[in-house]
Amino acid sequence: MASGTALVYDNEMTSHKLLWDDPICDIEVPERLSSCYERLKCYNLVERCISVPVREGTEEEIMLVHSLDYLEIVKRTPKMTEEELRKTSADYESVYFHLMTYRCAKLAVGATLELVDAVMSGKSQNGMALIRPPGHHSQRNAANGFCIFNNVAIAAKYAKRKYGLQRILIVDWDVHHGQGIQYIFDEDPSVLYFSWHRFEHQQYWPSLSESNYDAAGQGKGRGFNINVPWNKIGMGNSDYVAAFLHVLLPLAFEFDPELVLVSAGYDSGIGDPEGQMSATPECFAHLTHLLMHLAKGKLCVVLEGGYHLRSLSESVCMTLKTLLGDPLPRLSGEMAPCLSAVESIHNVRAVHKPHWECLMFEDTVPLLDLSTSPYQMGEAKSTQTGAQLLPPQESGKANSAEAIKTDRFLELHMKKIAFPIPRIKTTVAVDEKERCLLPPSVQVEKATDPKELKAILSGFDAELVKEEKVFNSLVNMLAVLDKIIKKEVTNGLAVSSVASLSSAVALKHCHNLKIQKVLCVFVGDMDMKIDLDDGEVLLINVDANPPTKSDTKYNISVNWKKDVETNNFFSAALGFILPVAYSYQPDLTVIVVGPKQSVGKNGITLLISLLQGLAQSHILTLIQDTEVKLLQDIIKPLTGDFIPYFGTYAPDLKENVQRTLELREQFQQEWKLLQCSAKVSTAER
């Protein structure tokens, strides 16, 4: 099994630089690259990665995307005078050439392809290429928008040719539309291209009608081009997460890519003079985490834009930490997407509904009457996430005062979200006969003090805990839970003869220790009532029984009928549970696999793996002893010894999807992330 994270970097790519005054291009500086690498070293991340050497891309590789005529023009630039370089640059939009540009652009291509080789050959599980000049705007016959060769597009063509790949996902989270990639694959159904970008009703560069949500691809590629246009500035963490949960991930799981390439532009992050957005660095950790569930973890992240050096470098570090498998920090800010984001996401889903089975049963219609045009400057304040003191900057200008404000904000912010990573990731409490099923990396837990247990159990039926087997189950569970709460381990697992009672005791223990918010997802039949204090515990029960009506948003019943044919759980996991969980932002997650569960091993492992993005990845998993056959599958996502694959996509049962739709509509006002896919009433519009 492939493991490890590759890092591709060469300082020589900093030699590409602007030689004359140009107010548009002067933000694309060599320090964009060097500051990222230096920050990675500060966090001791470089030494944890597999170093991959850089090479030049060959002419043949470059011509997988670009024309010979264009290549010949770029090849001549090393011999040009400065005046000739300026004249050649002027032939293209927002581009500059230097004597070293051709060499650096070839290195950028070669570095990207070396990363693809490292991942596809199994040398590493995933990786990141720190390169420049960037690439996603460049087209077959033209440089464009700081981009010389289209590194990611070349990588996709290269992977198809060398490894015979038939399905590649490109995710472009740069704040600008990567129209170069879109043009190259517009008619190609083997490449699914997703881009969100600042659009402002076609008023923001590159100001193309084909950047709007209704540009879904051409010919056989119809439905394989996904544009999420942002029609205002200030988009933040909740808007980005909402776009992933309600647009990208459902379509991507159905597409089932064999490789994921990320055009990673961090100008979509806080403080960037180009983007004027509000996403904080840890947001990119969460986006990366979600993408790691695709293509069996084969993920290549390739640097594109990013023009505030501290924001860029911190975001790069958060991305790489996630690729390395570190626990995720809590997302800052309220998880409530703005009205403009809700509109864009609904419109994208409506356009793509005819092309994707995952949207087949969705009640999805365009929400054009929510239009935010003309853009209202004051509206941006509503989505500022942890950055209310950072007003929008003039686009393209690195205002020094605003840049300093962002630096100060990030200095404090990164200290708040930083936390020590436990040396041991996973601890378990299982019977001796089950230890042989566990990987050697886990720690086997010993029982806690019985006196302490008796105090915790004082509120429960004394007859229940008299049995030795029950008592031992509870003792073992509490030993694991205490390790997680004390942050001595990241997560833990316990097998119990009484899953319902164990979960109730666990929640009471959390209450006694004043854990403020606990998410409990119970999969299967609960045979006892769990007392809930509103807000302190959010209980989601997934079972095959008829749903019970809830009078609180903190006690939710998800009816899920078992489907032996598909064994999928995508619509409920992505369309309801994850949006609610991200809206709630727990301090601890408890996942219980009880008797008569109807989700199946694929659904359970999907759920556990996705929910590791929350609560700093602190998860207690409880398994009813009758379900111990799932132990080997469940332990893998907890330990990270996991190449995620959740089965071939097939549409969920219509009645299961219908229940998800009903829940979204019922709870959309309480859990705001649901609004991006819930049916919106006329009054709410």
Image (cartoon, rainbow, N blue to C red):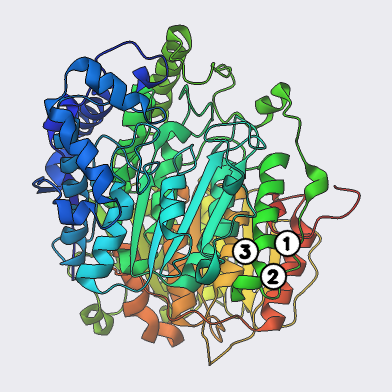
Q: Nearer the viewer, residue 326 or 483?
A: 326
Residue ranking furthest to the bottom: 564
Q: Can the viewer see residue 355?
A: yes
Across and down, in percent, residue 386 comes to 54, 27
Q: How many marks?
A: 3
Q: Are marks 1 and 2 in contact (CB under 8 Å)?
A: yes
The residue that disc 1 covers is 664
Q: Amino acid at mark 3?
A: Gly
The residue that disc 2 covers is 660
Across and down, in percent, residue 654 comes to 69, 82
Q: Secondary structure at mark 3?
A: helix
**Compared with residue 153, is residue 137 higher up or lower down, i.e. above or below?**
above
Image point (33%, 54%), residue name: 153
Across and down, in percent, residue 456 comes to 51, 58
Q: Nearer the viewer, residue 583 or 9?
A: 9
Q: Amino acid at mark 1?
A: Arg
